[in-house]
Image (cartoon, coloured by chain):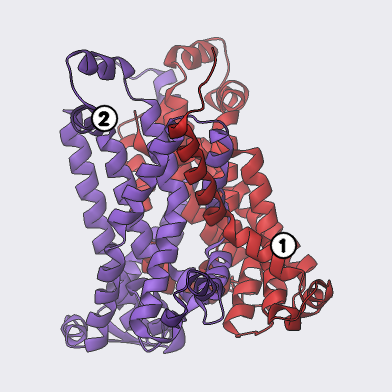
Amino acid sequence: MKKKFGLKNTLIFATMSLLAVVMLYPFIFMIATSFKSKEQYFGAPGHSLSSWHNLFKALPVGRQLINSTLVCAGAIFIILFVATMAGFALAKLRSKASPYFFLGIVGAMLIPLQSIIIPAYINASKLNLLTGYWGAIFVYAALGTPFATFLMTSYFRGIPDDLVEAAVVDGLSYGAVFRKVAMPLAVPAVITVIVLQFIQIWDDLLVGLLFIQDPNYRTITVGLGALSAGRVTDIPVLMAGSLISAIPAVVVYLIFQRQLVNGLTAGIGK
Amino acid sequence: MKKVSPLHKSRRRTGLIFASPALILVAAFLGIPIIQAGYFSFTEWNGITAIWHGISTYTHELHNPIFWRVLQNNGYLLLGVPIAILFPMGIAFLLNEKVVGWKVFRTIYFLPTAISWVVIGMVAMRFFAQEGLLNGLLRGAGLGFIKTDLLSSEQGALFTVGITFIWSMVGTNTIIFLTGMATLDQSLNEAARMDGANNLRIFRSITLPQLTRFIQFSFIITIISAFTALFSLIFVMTGGGPGFGTTTLEFFIYQSAFSRGDFGTGAMLGVLLFFIMAILGVGQLLIMRNRDE
């Protein structure tokens, strides 16, 4: 079939292209600005790498990228551990208590971070969780668990009860059914949880700002936020830092776009 | 009476054991703190010692003009919600025409959802700055006399936060509507066209009703974002200022506790935010239940 490319489609294409520039503007600006020196940003002609050199003096980029990775990995590991088990239990190992468990865990989605952050901060400081990564890891894990549990529960509901019961009759324990039958089937949902949480935690400022007190443990996003709030006026340096901080999440997004969209629209239901 | 089989018993036991870690984690870091927030909201609390004041902490806050100013700021941001929904809906319709390259455009429009509000805020700040692109564009369009310095005035700064917020919601809401449009039943359109309905009529009577739950979903997501997702943006762009010009409820919570050391007031404001979100959540649930029946 031949597609016509009439006036209407040309107009649509033009509009969408213009919109694409608007949506890509931050990237264009970050890239263009990071290759200028401070003087060039304020009008001097030419390009230079000086801002990239200065970035590594202003911000321990390597260290902070590792910190971000560790915090993400720790929190995501905990989320997957508790949410896959809870999801399987709530979908396939139902008892009278299940609805209350479900309500307790998934209902916590309604609690905004800002509402609990003050008591949580005080508790964490009393438990000495603010010195390393753990405070942030636990808070991120707790914040991600409700939605992940919701996602895993709806996913495991798609596995027929008969399949589980047949495996149990064959002599597997419920734990073994979970590991050997259910988990291999749940890989797509697990990937969705990982991608969603990675982007959320990588990009977060507030939790990292409060729950990581030692600057050496700061994530890249928190490092940038702190630089910016310190009103560093070297904008090209800030933009180089922003670009570096954005790249990992953008790469993950480009690879796992489908899973991200699935996760986002999972809340609409059928 | 049916006897409980050993198998049934083992299933129930495993179920409880499996669900417990998630419940404990959520209880420890979300459940208990929200109850603590409720308690401390009635106290004067500096993080170490708390003095019970009862309901007077609330009534006292109601007489604080800054508190009302903050709620007003939230109200102004909510004015952006319809735009943050309708604009992406229009974009989704354009994408749905499936013109050459639409998949690339879809990827591009959704891309900003992957970057941090911190980064968005830093770029937005330079865009709206006096020597930024906005003024450059105005000059280019021969409107140089409008030269704005939005970030230096209270209303202007709130406006820039609002515009940046709307821009940031484009990706998410466009994807929601695009998902919705993929579920549309094309045969209905054709049947209506046979019966002589025009495009507008088809849109109003056939397309919109089928999109209702997607509109609701994006509405809820956008409102929740307006109330709870803008902390980093405000932190980076304006620090809540100038004055209290861009201090929203969520930012006010942070300021009360972590800039002024007034943890009691912070906890109280947090409880208030929780109730606003809970009412929205329950409302959403009721709407969904009505629809399903």
Which colour is chain A painted?
red
Circle 1 chain: A
Instruction: Identify the amino acid type marked 2.
Output: Thr
Q: From the top left corner, tell me how far across and down residue B121 is, in percent.
A: 52, 69
Residue shown at 37% from the left, 75% from the top: B158
Q: From the top left corner, tell me how far across and down residue A76 is, in percent.
A: 60, 49
Which colour is chain B painted?
purple
The residue pinned by badge 2 equals B207
Q: Which mark is residue A244?
A: 1
Quarter of the image that includes the N terminus of chain B: top left
Instruction: Identify the amino acid type marked 1.
Output: Ile
Q: From the top left corner, tell me how far across and down residue A4 is, in percent.
A: 50, 22
Position of B137 with respect to B197 (left or right) is right
Position of B289 with respect to A200 (left or right) is left
Q: What is the secondary structure assignment of the residue under circle 2?
A: helix
Q: Quadrant of residue B35?
A: bottom left
Q: Quadrant of residue A270?
A: top left
Q: Quadrant of residue B217?
A: top left
Pick the front one: B185 or B255: B185
Q: What is the secondary structure assignment of the residue under circle 1?
A: helix
Residue shown at 62% from the left, 67% from the top: A221
